[in-house]
Amino acid sequence: MSLPRKNRKAKFLYDNSYKYAIQGSLLGLLIVVLTYTLFFLSVQYPFDFSSLKSIHSNNPFIYIIDFLPLLTSVGAFYIAHSIQIDKISISKELDSKNLLINKRFYF
């Protein structure tokens, strides 16, 4: 059983948006891991939770880095969603223009 055309476009819209949101969160996680790796290697902290606590107390900017996976996934979802909406509206406009041209002129 296939979905109606309108529902297929809506499903496609959200499938691509979620794909980009997952990629954005993976990019954010990679940035977090690289940041912690740099801190552990440059300052010679041992790898445990007490050193994570001391890194956060010495550098409050790290709290922003901790939220990067969330921020990048939401941002990627929003951008992908708006691009997909634009693509669908342009496609509808082109279809209507093609139909109008084909009605008036016989090729």
Image: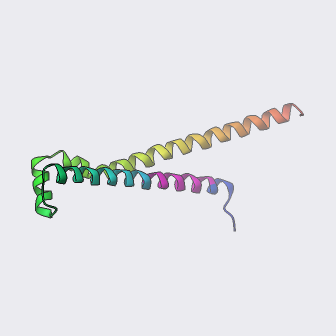
Whether the magenta-drawn stretch holds residue 15 is answered as yes
Looking at the picture, tell me which residue is in the foreground, 83 or 97: 83
Q: Position of residue 5 (x, y in %)?
A: 68, 55
Question: Does the stretch in magenta take in 12?
Answer: yes
Question: Relative to the observer, which residue lies in front, 54 or 67?
Answer: 54
The structure residue drawn at horizontal position 53% and vertical position 42%, both measured from the top left corner, is: 83
Q: Is residue 70 visible?
A: no
In the picture provided, is 84 more to the left or to the right than 30?
Answer: right
Q: How many marks?
A: 0
Using residue 57 as the reference point, say whether residue 19 is left or right of it. Answer: right
Instruction: Write the residue at 18% across / 54% down.
Output: 40
- Magenta: main secondary structure equals helix
Q: Which x, y percent locates residue 105?
A: 87, 31
What range is drawn magenta here?
A: 9-21
Q: Identify which residue, 69 or 91, lies in the foreground.
A: 69
Residue 48 in percent (x, y) is at 15, 64
